[in-house]
Amino acid sequence: MWRCWHRTSTGPGKTSDVRRVGVSSPRQQPGRLTSWLARCGGLILVLAWTWCGLVVPAHADGLIISSRPAGEAGPQVDAAQVSPVARAVPVIVAQPRTYVVQRGDTLSAIATRHGTSVAALMALNGLASADRIQAGQILQIGGAVSPLPQLSADGPLMRVQFWPWPPRQGQTMAIWLQTPAEVSPTLRFGHQTIPVTAAGRHSWALIPIDALAATETRPLTITVGSMTWVFPVTIWPGAFEVQQIPASASDPILSQVERVNAEWARMAALFARRSADGWTPRSRFVLPLAADVNYELSSPFGSRRTYGGSTGISAHAGEDFAAPTGTPVLAPAAGTVVLAESLFVRGNAVVLDHGRGVLTGYWHLDTLAVTAGERVRPGQVLGTVGNTGLSTGPHLHWELRVDGVAVDPLQWLE
């Protein structure tokens, strides 16, 4: 929503700058580059947890648990190419431990007390220097290891696949299930019921992880018939920037509470819609701007923001691309226009419904080129970049919602 302010890096592994290179240079084959960077980022995190004394044999790009040595042909084949089978006895990291830095603490003393190393703490918390800690800072220390449930060869659940594994704040975790008979499995993640799409003996679901979700272990409960399995899923911390929005820019928002709340309520209801067909875990986006121009990612998804003198922290719900006014904004995938009008906060806005609870939004546009109810194809012009609504400069805010939760759209770039 805001084009550009002072930014610093936060979170373990300062990967946000690396990620921006892949996105802001589309001519460098963004799909392959972001895939490569994702694998490197996953490897760095696995090494960090290993340095803390943990064993994480499950690949960071995905995890497959099967009652048979080889999976059957079906919807999971494509996913298996990006989610290799876990080695030997699959395990995951249980709830990460944290420590609040006290006055007089040193990283060396903290490492000694918790049986780890300075290098491990630096890698896990994205610290550039061992001297740069301060009282009140929360450090990730590590956690215990918990085994995953096993599947029996004659049971009603033959195969479970997760991608990405483990999930991080702001990501969407896809789950594929395979059963020996045509059934309709049920899923619960913590206290939340997750919609499941079934197709014969195969089914899948998407679980959106909020950018501000607690880094904790939550139970994922899968029920098939009379049998239930509980998989502990640990949410890993993401790597997000910190942005301070000055009072001169935030006061107009805070002083228009009724209008802002009314718009948020309307958008929440819109994002909660769920059509029967469309998006699948194998669907992918293209960038919503022309691929032959280098656009700066001026405000990444999940950036931690404070407004004026408030200490409250919010997370940026989309990816902001700095681009000149009039730059064409393109549909990143097929969908149906469910909103195309001027809003108070978001300015000229378009919302696309891609199906099955997956919707994308495009804010602060200068002009609109589509109307509500229209079906659009990938690459079709939705409008042009602008500076409408509560915006501080020309840019495109691209937002992805899965079952109403804002998640990072860059995860789904082809």
Image: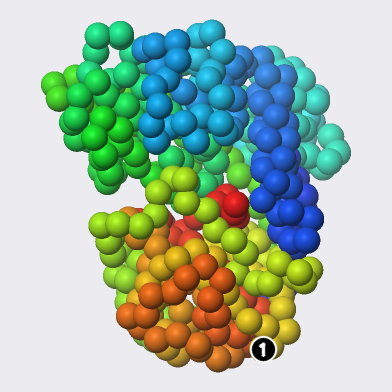
Q: What residue appears at the point 48 percent right and 82 percent down from the top-left corner?
A: 349
Q: Is residue 285 left or right of residue 375?
A: right
Q: In this view, does 234 lie to the left or right of 295?
A: left
What kind of colouring is applied to the model shown? rainbow
Q: What residue type is labelled 1?
A: Gly
Report the number of numbered marks.
Answer: 1
Q: Vertical placement of 324 versus 353: above or below?
A: below
Q: Vertical placement of 227 versus 363: above or below?
A: above
Q: What residue appears at the point 46 percent right and 59 percent down from the top-left corner?
A: 406
Q: Which residue lies furthest to the left in this view?
A: 226
Secondary structure of residue under mark 1: loop
Q: How many residues crowd around disc 1 within 10 Å: few (fewer than 14), some, or many (20 or more)?
A: some
Name the one closer to the observer, 104 or 296.
Answer: 296
Q: What residue appears at the point 54 percent right and 18 percent down from the top-left corner?
A: 86
Q: Is residue 233 visible?
A: no
Residue that numbered label 1 is attached to: 326
Q: What residue appears at the point 43 percent right and 60 percent down from the top-left corner?
A: 401
Res 302 quadrant in image: bottom right
